Image (cartoon, rainbow, N blue to C red):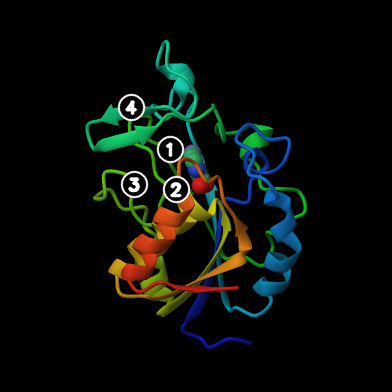
Amino acid sequence: MRGADEALIVIDVQNDFCPGGALAVTGGDEIIARINALMAEFSCVVLTQDWHPANHASFAANHPGAAPFSLTQMPYGPQVLWPTHCVQGTKGAEFHPNLRTDPAQLVIRKGFRAGIDSYSAFFENDKTTATGLHGYLQDRGARKLTLVGLATDYCVAYSALDAAKLGYQVTVLEGACRAIDLNGSLAAAMTETRAAGVIWAA
Ligand code: VGL
Ligand code: ZN
């Protein structure tokens, strides 16, 4: 068992990010067995769930003429336009059926405001709107975070970066993550998070 100040954060292991899903990450389902086993090591386990309304501004389908994976400008900065995914209440937004959810004490949903995307589990993409996770982790006494899940270069990396900025000791278990890798996004994410003090382990 890990220390009482350690927490496991499982990012977005949902059907739409797994093979067959709307925004499938290659090998996304391969990490589930390891994540299930890891949960038993931590007294604090949090799951995150990408949870968008159908009219979400990050969906290419809501921008007439825009192609999926193209870039647009939002009031808060550049934003990738994604295929419609993780719509609230749909099968695609559910956790993968093989993921154990019973060991988690908190499920935090993000990306539920139509106008703002949220990659990070801590702050939405405007970098100011908080999800509430930091307050929860503080109340639980967590200081060291282990991050796993999908996708390495988006929600996992953005969460790791914010966690490091908030003062947590952060480790990403790369082997328990899978990446989208859009235009060098994986290398960029690893460089940026390492510079912020995030440790990448196997
Ligand atoms: C994610 C793109 C859009 C992720 C979520 O979980 O990494 N990526 N929404
Ligand atoms: Zn999303």
Residue appearing at x 53%, y 55% in the figure:
152
Distance between the alpha carbons at the discs numbered 1 and 3: 10 Å
Residue at left 67%, top 50%? 28
Q: Earlier in the sequence, mark 3 or mark 4?
A: 4
Would you place residue 29 above or below residue 39 in this image?
Answer: above
Dot 1 or dot 2: first in sequence order is: 1
Q: Quadrant of residue 196?
A: bottom left
Residue type marked 3: Glu
Discs 1/4, front = 4
| Amino acid bearing label 2 | Ser
Q: CA distance from mark 1 to mark 2?
A: 24 Å
The kind of residue on which mark 1 rests is Phe
Mark closest to the chain's N terminus, 2 or 3: 3
Q: To which residue does mark 1 refer? A: 112
Contact flag, marks 3 and 4 (Cβ < 8 Å): no
- Residue at image location 34% in from the left, 47% down from the top: 124
Quarter that holds the N terminus: bottom right
Distance, label 3 to label 4, CA atoms, is 17 Å
Residue 193: x and y in percent read: 37, 64
Task: Answer with mark 1 or mark 3, whichever residue precedes in sequence.
Answer: 1
21, above or below 11, in the image = above
Which residue is the site of mark 4?
Answer: 72
Secondary structure beneath disc 2? helix
Look at the picture and state if 31 lies above or below 95.
Answer: below
- How many numbered circles are shown? 4
Image quarter where the C terminus lies is bottom right
Instruction: Classify 10 Å Cα crowding around label 1: few (below 14), some (14-19), many (20 and above).
Output: some
Q: What residue did someone put label 2 on?
A: 185
Residue 98 point in image, percent of width and height: 77, 54
Comparing labels 1 and 2, the label whose residue is closer to the camera = 2
Q: Is residue 54 left or right of residue 131?
A: right
Q: Which residue is mark 3?
A: 124
